Amino acid sequence: MKGMAGGMAQLMKQANQMQMKMKKLQEDLASRTYEGTAGGGAVKVTVTGQNVVKSIEIGTDVMKSGDVEMVQDLVMAATNEALKTAKDSSSKEMEKITGGMNIPGLF
């Protein structure tokens, strides 16, 4: 029975270490920025690892076109690309820590 208790303690220690690594990674990811572009770079959106939009740049040519729907579509496309890049990056970094284990409630 003693071996099982020792194994459990080791497992708890590993879980705590993994949790600490994940917390540090989340803080690191929050400070990173990710870009998405649309319209051949006419619109550029920058987001953080916490999915907060930091900046939106819209080229003057796009604004001069007067096509409001096109501008909206380009902003939406660039934002979605930036958010997808942030999510993909975050998932890859988490996999390094969890070894690919899917741990419910952690992300």
Image (cartoon, rainbow, N blue to C red):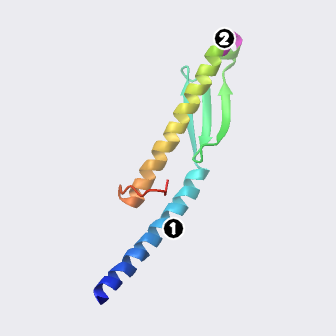
Q: CA distance from mark 1 to mark 2?
A: 49 Å
Q: Amino acid at mark 2?
A: Asp
Nearest to the observer: residue 78 or residue 104? 104
Q: Is residue 42 visible?
A: no
Binning the other alpha carbons within 10 Å of mark 1 as few (below 14), some (14 to 19) or many (20 upward) gives: few
Q: Return the mark for residue 96.
A: none
Residue 96 image offset from top left, x and y in percent: 39, 57
Binning the other alpha carbons within 10 Å of mark 2 as few (below 14), some (14 to 19) or many (20 upward) gives: few
Residue 72 image offset from top left, x and y in percent: 64, 21
- The question of residue 66 being in magenta is answered with yes
Q: Residue at x 57, y 47 (%)?
A: 49
- The question of residue 2 being in magenta is answered with no
Question: Which residue carries the number 1 mark?
Answer: 20
Nearest to the observer: residue 64 or residue 97? 97
For residue 55, above or below residue 32: above
Magenta span of residues: 64-68
Check disc 2 and report its element: helix, strand or loop.
loop
Question: Which residue carries the number 2 mark?
Answer: 67
> Which residue is outermost to the front?
1
For residue 32, above or below residue 68: below
Q: Residue at x 54, y 62 (%)?
A: 23
Q: Are marks 1 and 2 in contact (CB under 8 Å)?
A: no
Check disc 1 and report its element: helix, strand or loop.
helix
Residue 83 image offset from top left, x and y in percent: 54, 38
Drawn side of residue 50 relative to residue 95, left or right: right
In the picture, which quadrant includes the N terminus?
Answer: bottom left
Q: Amino acid at mark 1?
A: Met
Residue 50 image offset from top left, x and y in percent: 60, 47
Drawn side of residue 55 relative to residue 84, left or right: right
Drawn side of residue 102 relative to residue 36, left or right: left
